[in-house]
Image (cartoon, rainbow, N blue to C red):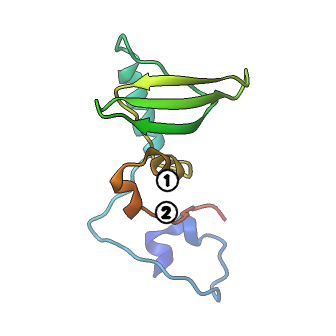
């Protein structure tokens, strides 16, 4: 039964292996990579948008005026600087939860993550 609605996950899996799964009939797959690329492409048209790759966020704090002070370390130059941002986007993925927790926003306390992969 499971191999019919999640064939990639079930491929080459030992049929004797015990597994559990939940299915939502009205659910759908989301290609977060595609959505992120589209979002970045649209944002790059804005004059104040700056995309930083190979950077690690070391701390982030939202101030009373709503702006964010984000401390980042450049993975190539090994330098650290603070960025003053009006908006911070945290995409889905393994690194999103720790960043959300660093944000200090109340919603972060109710979040958890469970690794999900179709790879064997």
Residue at the location (42% across, 48% down)?
104
Q: CA distance from mark 1 to mark 2?
A: 7 Å
**Is 85 left, or right, of 99 in this rendering?**
left
Q: Which mark is residue 97?
A: 1
Depth order, front residue of 59/6: 59
Q: Quadrant where the C terminus lies?
A: bottom right
98 versus 5 height, above or below = above
- Disc 1 to disc 2: CB gap under 8 Å: yes
Residue at the location (34% across, 55% down)?
107
Depth order, front residue of 35/53: 53
Q: Could you tell me which secondary element the residue under label 2 belongs to?
A: loop
Q: Could you tell me which secondary element the residue under label 1 belongs to?
A: helix
Q: Quadrant where the N terminus lies?
A: bottom left
User: Where residue 77 appears, x then y in whole percent?
Assistant: 73, 20
User: Where residue 47 appears, x then y in whole percent?
Assistant: 36, 10
Q: Which mark is residue 113?
A: 2
Crowd class of label 2 (few under 14; some 14 to 19; many from 20; radius 10 Å): few
**Is 74 left, or right, of 41 in this rendering?**
right
Residue at the location (56% across, 83% down)?
19
User: Where residue 92 appears, x then y in whole percent?
Assistant: 46, 48
């Amino acid at each position: 039964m499971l191999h019919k609605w999640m064939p990639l996950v079930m491929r080459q899996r030992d049929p004797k292996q015990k597994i559990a799964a939940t299915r939502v009939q009205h659910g759908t797959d989301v290609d977060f990579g595609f959505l992120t690329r589209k979002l970045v492409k649209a944002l790059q048209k804005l004059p104040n948008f700056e995309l930083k790759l190979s950077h690690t966020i070391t701390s982030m704090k939202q101030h009373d005026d709503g702006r964010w002070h984000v401390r980042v370390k450049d993975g190539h130059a090994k330098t650290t600087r603070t960025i003053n941002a009006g908006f911070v986007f945290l995409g889905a993925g393994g690194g999103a939860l720790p960043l959300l927790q660093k944000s200090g926003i109340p919603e972060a306390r109710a979040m958890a993550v469970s690794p999900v992969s179709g790879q064997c």
